[in-house]
C-alpha cells in the first residue's frame, strides 16, 4: 500500500545558485548546482526544475545527473535573469543506502540576487542555498 512506502528526506544534499562568468554571454550569469555533502556516493540522481509566478510558468525540465561522488558538486542548469522573479523549485531524487531519497528545494521570488550571497559548502565559493 502507498502508506507503507517510506521515502526518507535527503540530508546533506543541497541545491545552490552560483554566479559565474559565462564566456558565451560575456557576463556574469546564475547557475544552479547540486552538491553532495554526504559521506557516500549518491546514485541515479534526477533533478526536476520548474518555475512559476502569479500569471506565468516555465517549462518543466528534467536532468539525469547519474552518480555523484561524496563531497562534490555538479552543475545542473543555467537560470535566466527573466525567471529570477519566479518561485523556482528543484525536486531531487536519488538512491543511497539501498533506499530512494527525495527532497524539494525552493528559491523564492527574487531570492537569487547579489545582496543575498553567502559562503557555500563544498564549492568553496559564494552563492545562495535553496530552502
Image: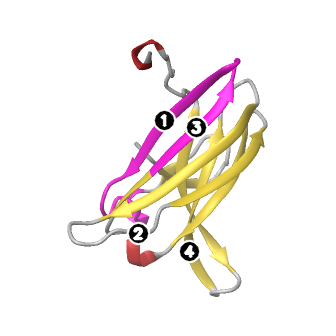
Residue 13, x across and y down, in percent: 58, 35
Question: Upstream in the sequence, badge 2 or badge 4?
Answer: 4
Helix, strand or loop at label 1? It is: strand
Question: Upstream in the sequence, badge 1 or badge 4?
Answer: 4
Note whether 22 is above or below 72 in the view shown: below
Residue 58: mark: 2
Q: Is residue 43 magenta?
A: no
Q: Looking at the picture, tell me which residue is in the foreground, 4 or 48.
A: 4
Residue 29: mark: 4
How far apart are labels 2 and 3 at the CA level?
Answer: 21 Å
Q: Is residue 98 magenta?
A: yes
How far apart are labels 3 and 1 at the CA level?
Answer: 7 Å
Q: Are marks 1 and 4 in contact (CB under 8 Å)?
A: no
**Farthest-out residue, top:** 4
How far apart are labels 2 and 1 at the CA level?
Answer: 20 Å
| In-image side of 111 versus 121 (left or right) | left
| Pointer 3 residue | 93
| In-image side of 107 versus 56 (left or right) | right
Tag in front: 1 or 4: 1
How far apart are labels 4 and 3 at the CA level?
Answer: 26 Å
Note whether 4 is above or below 114 in the view shown: above
Disc 4 packing (10 Å; few <14; some 14–19; many ≥20): some
| Pointer 1 residue | 103
Q: Provide the residue span drawn in magenta.
A: 90-116
Residue 39, x across and y down, in percent: 72, 24
How far apart are labels 1 and 4 at the CA level?
Answer: 25 Å
Amino acid at each position: 500500500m502507498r502508506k507503507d512506502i517510506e521515502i526518507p528526506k535527503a540530508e546533506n544534499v543541497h541545491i545552490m545558485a552560483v554566479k559565474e562568468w559565462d564566456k558565451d554571454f560575456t557576463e556574469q550569469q546564475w547557475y544552479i548546482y547540486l552538491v553532495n555533502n554526504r559521506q557516500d556516493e549518491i546514485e541515479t540522481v534526477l533533478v526536476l526544475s520548474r518555475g512559476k509566478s502569479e500569471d506565468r510558468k516555465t517549462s518543466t525540465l528534467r536532468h539525469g545527473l547519474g552518480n555523484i561522488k561524496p563531497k562534490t558538486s555538479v552543475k545542473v542548469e543555467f537560470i535566466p535573469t527573466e525567471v529570477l522573479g519566479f518561485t523556482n523549485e528543484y525536486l531531487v531524487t536519488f538512491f543511497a543506502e539501498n533506499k530512494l531519497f527525495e527532497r524539494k528545494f525552493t528559491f523564492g521570488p527574487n531570492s537569487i540576487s547579489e545582496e543575498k550571497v553567502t559562503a557555500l559548502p563544498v564549492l568553496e565559493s559564494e552563492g545562495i542555498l535553496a530552502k
